[in-house]
Amino acid sequence: MITEQALIDLMTKYQSLGIFKAGELLLPPAIALKLADELADLGVVIGIVDGWYYVGLEKEGIAPDLDVDFSIPDKLILEENAPKLAAEMAKEYILTNVTKKTDLISFFLNIPSDWSIYALE
């Protein structure tokens, strides 16, 4: 069974590889693919995949990429192997739907709402 501390440890490992914005960890797509596998190994179900892109002449801002937005079907959460299935669906979505404009990916995780999983929070 997944523990809050195990998830904190995993997310701390990835924080230095991405950007923390508005309570979300945004990662380059290739790194997000690796995180998806590690989340599945830990037993965490990915619920949503969102895309982000840099804005401004100096790429000083970040905005949501509304063309990259995917929700894992709710019924999947009840499956015994939900973490693996969700990770595979998330990875397939990233590999086939991320555009040239998409610089970063974030995941919404199906975890207890009172967990604080980022060291920066």
Image (tube, rainbow, N blue to C red):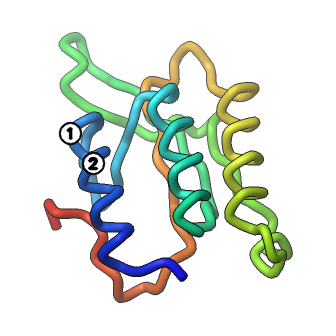
* Classed neighbour count for the residue bearing mark 2: other residues with Cα under 10 Å, few (<14), some (14–19), many (≥20): few
* Horizontal arrangement in the rendering, residue 16 relative to residue 100 (left or right): left
- Residue 10 location (% of width, % of height): 35, 57
Say above or below: 56 vs 46.
above
Q: What residue sits right under mark 1 in the picture? A: 16
Where is residue 60 shown, x and y percent of the image? 19, 25
Q: Which mark is residue 85?
A: none
What residue is at 24 percent from the left and 48 percent from the top? Answer: 20
Image quadrant holding the C terminus, namely bottom left
Q: If the image is split into quadrants, where does the N terminus sit?
A: bottom right
- The spot of residue 15 in percent (x, y) is 25, 46
Q: Amino acid at mark 1?
A: Ser
Q: Quadrant of residue 76?
A: bottom right
Q: Report the Cα–Cα distance between label 2 and label 1.
A: 7 Å
- In this view, 53 is above or below 81: above
Observer-nearest residue: 81 or 54? 81
Q: Where 7 sits versus 14, above or below? A: below
Label placed on residue 13:
2
Q: Is residue 114 above or below residue 68?
A: below
